[in-house]
């Protein structure tokens, strides 16, 4: 199982924040927050090499809270060392 370090997660969030304008221009799927969380979720799915079975499924139209919960769920058992991803997510969205 692939794990992610706090440093790697922070770097991904920082890069998404830095590229936010381009991401939003080409992938407007909802609010700014929803779009950036959608991008983070997609990057994590790829980075962690999640299988189709491990990838979160949504039963309704996902919103910011849904994406955030999915990201935290994915990270729950895939952090190389304990860290609080919420602070990096919040910073990415600010």
Image: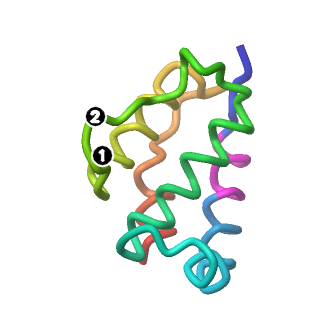
Distance from the alpha carbon under mark 1 to that under mark 2: 10 Å
Give the side of residue 80 with respect to residue 57, left or right: right
Q: Which mark is residue 66?
A: 1
At a point 30% along the width and 46% down the height, the residue shown is 66
Asked which secondary structure carries label 2, the reply is loop
In which quarter of the view is residue 78 placed? top right
Q: Residue at x 54, y 46 (%)?
A: 41
In the image, residue 7 lies in the stretch drawn in magenta: yes
Using the image, determine if residue 16 lies above or below residue 82. below
* Residue 86 percent coordinates (x, y): 41, 51
Instruction: In the rendered view, tell whether residue 84 sits above or below residue 22.
Output: above
Horizontal placement of 13 versus 71: left or right?
right
Which residues are the magenta region? 6-12
Q: Which one is in front in this view, the residue at disc 1 or the one at disc 2? A: 2
Q: 52 or 1: nearer the eye?
A: 52
* Mark 2 lies on residue: 59
Q: How many numbered callouts?
A: 2
The tag on residue 34 is none
Residue at x-position 52% and y-position 19% = 77
């Amino acid at each position: 199982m692939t794990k992610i370090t706090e440093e790697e997660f922070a770097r991904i969030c920082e890069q998404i924040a830095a590229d936010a304008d381009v991401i939003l221009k080409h992938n407007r799927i909802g609010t700014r927050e929803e779009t950036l969380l959608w991008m983070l979720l997609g990057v994590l799915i790829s980075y962690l090499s999640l299988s189709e079975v491990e990838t979160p499924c949504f039963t309704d139209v996902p919103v910011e809270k849904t994406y955030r919960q999915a990201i935290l769920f994915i990270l729950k058992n895939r952090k190389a060392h304990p860290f609080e991803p919420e602070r990096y997510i919040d910073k990415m969205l600010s």
